Image (cartoon, rainbow, N blue to C red):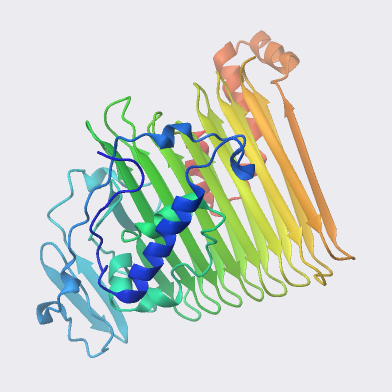
């Protein structure tokens, strides 16, 4: 067992460019180390538990594509379209220029995938303890999904991996870069519009070892493409299991592309979950993000959006609900890098017990970005005398003729409303639940997909 820096064999480490990038990530993490209370963006979320020396980093299994195997060529005549089926039988159906891959895996990595289904139609991709389960849904033409290691092996990842993340500023992203081999490469070609969401299900189930894993996803939407992606992190196992999920997404949105990005963080209550999503949006691209956190000992979700060209838009919203001694952190950094760009942030939290909610939101309007708008609002309800909310809104404006606002409010449930509801025969717990649900309702309304919105409401 060891700490966060370990000597571990990595897939594709013999490829010069990825080996150099991993070494750069390792050196960046060594230079910064685990953040402390003196680290500006971590002053409220102190990851002291991440200094433990008993983490176990598992070795990924070799994928079959790492050695060329003609048996896995679907021979559809499309050249680049090779299906890699790692378990069970392989079927490839190509018609009307459409390439669909159906991989029927008999090995389920110890979890019952039949139970891993959400109450709406979706394309499902699964991870178990940070390792990809090689099962692929039948996807429409123009949609490419492959393991990150495969995209590294065939060179597709080189154009994107590490291009958006500043590893000198984000130590855990540097660590993720040092060990980046698990994750997905997802690309939608020009004009492709998915008819249902892609669900990326990250399931953890640990026993005696304190597992540490890194996930890295590359998401590329070409011009006019449109998609919904739902990241789900859940846990099943011993109540006091401790593990660390370190996740990074790099999202590239071409002109007029649109991505609705949802996330549900429901980790074990002693787990640690640190995630960074960095988005670059070009002309008229639209990025909508909604994250709901109510698990983990330390849960930090950070979103950085670069509005790089005119008319790019970002709507970054979140809700969190926790008790015990958890710390849930939602940190944002929205950069308006072009004129006439627009952003909106709404974050709401419900905090009980000795828990702490953290919101750090930044809006930066670069010089000459006239006509831009950026708005930010955080509200929290404290359900106990020992609950705590730490809020740091920040505006940096270097241009004239812009509209910006930020606000923050913290309070308690209205005792008069509680009394009125109880006087009408509603017990105290149910009255509190109704008021909490009503408090979170307007942030949930940010979710345009009604089925996904209903599912999030069921988790409140």
The answer to whether residue 314 is above or below residue 64 is above
* Lateral position of residue 233 relative to residue 104, left or right: right
Residue shown at 26% from the left, 43% from the top = 115
Instruction: Indicate the position of residue 89 as horizontal and vertical percent values.
Output: 10, 67
Residue 386: name its quadrant. top right
The answer to whether residue 354 is above or below residue 144 is above
Q: Nearer the viewer, residue 456 or 39?
A: 39
**Number of numbered markers:** 0
Instruction: Indicate the position of residue 387 as horizontal and vertical percent values.
Output: 61, 21
Q: Nearer the viewer, residue 442 or 171?
A: 171
* Lateral position of residue 274 relative to residue 73, left or right: right
The answer to whether residue 223 is above or below residue 267 is below
Residue 248 shows in the view = no
Residue shown at 25% from the left, 61% from the top = 10
Q: Nearer the viewer, residue 453 or 255?
A: 255
Residue 243: name its quadrant. top left
Instruction: Indicate the position of residue 265 as horizontal and vertical percent values.
Output: 45, 41
Outermost residue, right side? 401
Residue shown at 62% from the left, 66% from the top = 286
The answer to whether residue 429 is above or below residue 229 is above
Residue 72 shows in the view = yes
**Quadrant showing the N terminus:** top left
* Lateral position of residue 449 relative to residue 311, left or right: left
Instruction: Indicate the position of residue 145 as horizontal and vertical percent values.
Output: 34, 69
């Amino acid at each position: 067992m060891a700490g966060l820096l370990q000597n571990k064999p990595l897939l594709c480490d013999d490829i010069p460019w990825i080996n150099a990038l991993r070494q750069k990530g390792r050196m960046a993490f060594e230079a910064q180390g685990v953040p402390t209370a003196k680290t500006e963006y971590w002053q409220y979320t102190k990851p002291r538990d991440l200094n433990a020396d008993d983490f176990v980093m598992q070795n990924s299994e070799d994928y079959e594509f790492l050695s060329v195997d003609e048996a896995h060529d679907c021979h559809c005549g499309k050249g680049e379209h090779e299906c890699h089926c790692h378990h069970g039988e392989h079927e490839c159906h190509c018609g009307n220029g459409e390439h669909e891959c159906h991989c029927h895996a008999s090995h389920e990595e110890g979890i019952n995938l039949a139970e891993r289904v959400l109450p709406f139609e979706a394309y499902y991709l699964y991870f178990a303890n940070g390792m990809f389960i090689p099962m692929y849904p039948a996807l429409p033409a123009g949609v490419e999904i492959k393991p990150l290691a495969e995209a590294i092996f065939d060179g597709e990842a080189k154009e994107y991996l590490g291009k958006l993340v500043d590893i000198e500023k984000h130590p855990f992203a540097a660590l993720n870069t040092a060990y980046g081999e698990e994750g997905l490469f997802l690309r939608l070609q020009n004009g492709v519009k998915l008819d249902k969401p892609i669900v990326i299900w990250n399931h953890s189930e640990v026993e005696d070892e304190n597992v540490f894993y890194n996930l890295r996803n590359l998401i590329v939407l070409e011009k006019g493409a449109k998609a919904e992606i739902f990241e789900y992190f859940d846990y099943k196992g011993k109540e006091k299991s401790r593990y660390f999920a370190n996740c990074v997404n790099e999202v590239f949105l071409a002109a007029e592309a649109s991505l609705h990005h949802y996330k549900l963080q429901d980790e074990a209550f002693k787990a640690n979950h640190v995630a960074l999503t960095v988005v670059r949006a070009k002309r008229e691209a639209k990025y909508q993000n909604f994250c709901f956190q109510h698990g983990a000992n330390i849960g930090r979700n950070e979103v950085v959006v670069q509005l790089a060209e005119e008319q790019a838009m970002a709507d970054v919203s979140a809700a969190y609900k926790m008790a015990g001694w958890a710390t849930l952190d939602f940190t944002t950094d929205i950069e308006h890098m072009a004129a006439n760009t627009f952003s909106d942030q709404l974050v709401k939290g419900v905090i009980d017990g000795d828990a702490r909610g953290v919101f750090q939101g930044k809006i930066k309007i670069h010089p000459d970005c006239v006509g831009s708008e950026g708005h930010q609002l955080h509200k929290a309800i404290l359900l106990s005398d020992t609950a705590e909310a730490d809020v740091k809104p920040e505006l940096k404006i270097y241009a004239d003729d812009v509209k910006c606002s930020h606000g923050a409010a913290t309070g308690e449930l209205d005792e008069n409303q509680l009394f009125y509801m109880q006087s009408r025969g509603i017990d105290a717990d149910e009255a509190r639940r109704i008021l909490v649900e009503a408090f979170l309702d307007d942030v949930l309304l940010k979710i345009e997909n009604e089925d996904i919105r209903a599912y999030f409401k069921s988790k409140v």
